[in-house]
Image: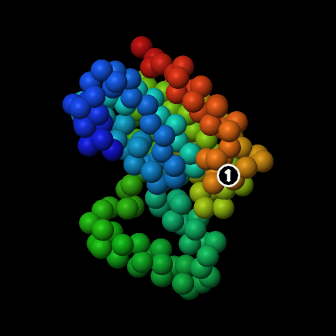
C-alpha cells in the first residue's frame, strides 16, 4: 500500500494531491495499517473506507475457530495452529490489531461499512473497530446485504463515493 502511494506521488504528482482508498476485510486491515504509519506515504492517505474489517486478529481467529472447530480441535488450532502460523509467516499475528491502527489514522476520516449478517467477520468485531477510531468517522451498517453483496451494491457505492468526495480531516 505504501509503495503504491509512493509510486502515485512520484509518477503522477498533479493527480495525487488527494489520495483516498478503500479496503475490504484483510485488505481493510492492511489499509488501516498503512494509513496509521507516520511516514510521508502513510500520512498522504487523506481518507479511507473500510468494508467488513475486524478489530484484532486474535478476535476474528477465535470467532472463526469457535464456529468451525469442536473441542479439542478448537483448542489445538487456537493454541498450536496460530503460533505455528506466526512462525511460518514471520508475523506476530496475535498483535496484529487494526483497532490500534484505526485510532492512529485520526485526524483523517474513516468510513466503516459492515453487515450485521457477516458470517466471516462478526458485526461486533466491526463495531469494536468503529468504536476505537477517533473522529472524524462515519459508518454504514447493513441489514439487508452481506459484505460480499455490499461491494457490488450501487447504493453502498454511492454512499462510499460521497463520503470519500466530501470527507475532510479534522484540524
Q: Is the C terminus in the top left, top right, bottom left or bottom right quadrant?
A: top left
x and y, in percent, of residue 25 in the image? 52, 53
| Residue 77, position as x, y percentages in the image | 48, 78
Residue 55 % position (x, y): 51, 50
SS state under label 1: helix
Q: Residue at x 59, y 57 (%)?
A: 121
Apparent side of residue 57 relative to residue 10 in the rendered image (left or right): right
* 28 left or right, relative to 117: left
Nearer-the-camera pick, 33 or 6: 6
Q: Residues within 10 Å of mark 1 (few under 14, many from 20)?
A: few
The residue that mark 1 highlights is 149
Is the residue 161 above or below the residue 74 in the image? Answer: above
Q: Vertical placement of 150 versus 160: above or below?
A: below
Q: Residue furthest right?
A: 144
Which of 15 and 18 lies nearest the eye of the viewer? 15
Q: Answer with left or right where residue 63 lies relative to residue 94.
A: right
Please state if 103 lies on the left or on the right of 165 as rendered: left
Residue in view at x 21 percent, y 31 percent: 10
Q: Position of residue 7 (x, y in %)?
A: 25, 37
Vertically, is 165 above or below 45? Answer: above
Q: Residue at x 64, y 31 (%)?
A: 159
Colour convention? rainbow
The foreground one among 79 and 107 is 107
Q: Residue furthest bottom?
A: 72
Q: Quadrant of the N terminus?
A: top left
Q: Residue 148 appears in which quarter of the rendering?
A: bottom right
Task: Name the quadrant containing residue 13.
Answer: top left
Q: Which residue lies at the image location 51% right of the left edge and 49% below the top edge?
A: 24
**Does residue 54 appear in the picture of this structure?**
yes
User: In the rendered image, which quarter is residue 157 located in?
Assistant: top right
Foreground of the two, 33 or 100: 33
Amino acid at each position: 500500500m505504501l509503495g503504491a502511494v509512493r509510486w502515485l506521488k512520484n509518477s503522477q504528482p498533479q493527480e495525487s494531491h488527494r489520495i483516498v482508498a478503500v479496503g475490504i476485510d484483510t485488505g481493510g486491515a492492511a489499509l488501516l495499517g498503512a494509513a496509521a504509519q507516520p511516514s510521508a506515504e502513510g500520512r498522504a492517505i487523506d481518507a479511507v473506507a473500510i468494508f467488513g474489517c475486524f478489530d484484532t486478529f486474535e478476535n476474528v481467529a477465535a470467532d472463526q475457530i469457535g464456529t468451525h472447530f469442536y473441542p479439542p480441535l478448537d483448542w489445538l488450532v487456537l493454541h498450536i495452529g496460530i503460533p505455528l502460523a506466526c512462525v511460518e509467516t514471520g508475523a506476530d499475528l496475535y498483535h496484529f490489531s487494526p483497532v490500534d491502527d484505526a485510532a492512529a489514522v485520526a485526524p483523517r476520516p474513516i468510513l466503516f461499512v459492515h453487515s450485521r449478517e457477516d458470517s466471516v467477520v462478526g458485526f461486533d468485531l466491526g463495531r469494536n473497530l468503529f468504536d476505537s477510531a477517533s473522529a472524524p468517522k462515519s459508518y454504514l451498517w447493513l441489514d439487508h446485504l452481506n459484505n460480499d453483496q455490499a461491494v457490488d451494491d450501487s447504493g453502498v457505492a454511492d454512499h462510499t463515493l460521497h463520503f470519500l468526495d466530501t470527507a475532510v480531516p479534522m484540524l
